[in-house]
C-alpha cells in the first residue's frame, strides 16, 4: 500500500443524547480529538431533502490506525468536521494488512 497523504486536520466527534424535557431526546456532539486524514471523493448525487435540494457525496477518509476499542479509532455513528463541513461515518475498516491505516467510508451532505 502506498502511504496516504494525510494533509487534512479533521475533528472527530461523537454524539451524546440527553432528554429534552418533553419526552424526547436531543443530540449534541462532543469533540474526541483531531486526526490527520486523506479525503478521497468517490461519488455524489443530488436529491431532495426536507429543506429542498440536497447534494450528497460519498468519501473514503484514510486516517492512522488504532486498535478496536481504542478511543482514537473512528466508529460508525460518529462524524468528522472540517470547519463547517461534516462527514457522517458509515463504516470503518483496516486499509492495510498491518493496520497502520484505517479507511472510513463517510457521507457529506450539502444543501444545494
Image (spheres, helix red, strand yellow):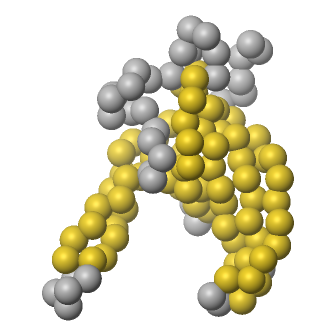
Up the image or down, 45 lies above or below 69; here it is below
Question: In this view of the protein, can residue 75 be seen by the observer?
Answer: yes
Q: Is residue 63 visible?
A: no
Name the image quarter holding the C terminus: bottom right
Q: What's the residue at 29%, 61% (across, down)?
A: 16
Which residue lies at the image location 82% right of the left edge and 60% below the top edge? 44
Going by the picture, which residue comes out furthest to the top?
98
Residue occupying image coordinates x 70% and y 40%: 60
At a point 46% along the width and 39% down the height, the residue shown is: 74
Q: Quadrant of residue 36?
A: top right
Q: Foreground: 9 or 75?
A: 75
Query: Where residue 27 sits: x, y (%)?
Result: 34, 70
Residue 73, position in %: x, y?
A: 43, 32
Which quadrant of the figure has residue 24? bottom left
Rendered position, 112 above or below 12? below
Q: Is residue 104 left or right of residue 67?
A: right
Query: Percent from the top left, x then y, of residue 26?
Result: 30, 76
- Determine the image quadrant of residue 48: bottom right
Is the residue 78 above or below the residue 6 in the image?
Answer: below
The total of numbered circles placed on residues is 0
Percent from the top left, x then y, of residue 1?
74, 13
Q: Is residue 39 above or below residue 77?
A: above
Amino acid at each position: 500500500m502506498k502511504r496516504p497523504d494525510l494533509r487534512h486536520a479533521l475533528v472527530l466527534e461523537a454524539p451524546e443524547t440527553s432528554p429534552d424535557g418533553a419526552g424526547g431526546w436531543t443530540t449534541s456532539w462532543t469533540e474526541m480529538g483531531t486526526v490527520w486524514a486523506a479525503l478521497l471523493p468517490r461519488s455524489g448525487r443530488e436529491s431532495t431533502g426536507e429543506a429542498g435540494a440536497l447534494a450528497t457525496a460519498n468519501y473514503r477518509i484514510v486516517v492512522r490506525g488504532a486498535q478496536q476499542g481504542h478511543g482514537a479509532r473512528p466508529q460508525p455513528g460518529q462524524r468528522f468536521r472540517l470547519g463547517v463541513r461534516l462527514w457522517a461515518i458509515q463504516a470503518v475498516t483496516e486499509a492495510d494488512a498491518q493496520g497502520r491505516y484505517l479507511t472510513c467510508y463517510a457521507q457529506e451532505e450539502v444543501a444545494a
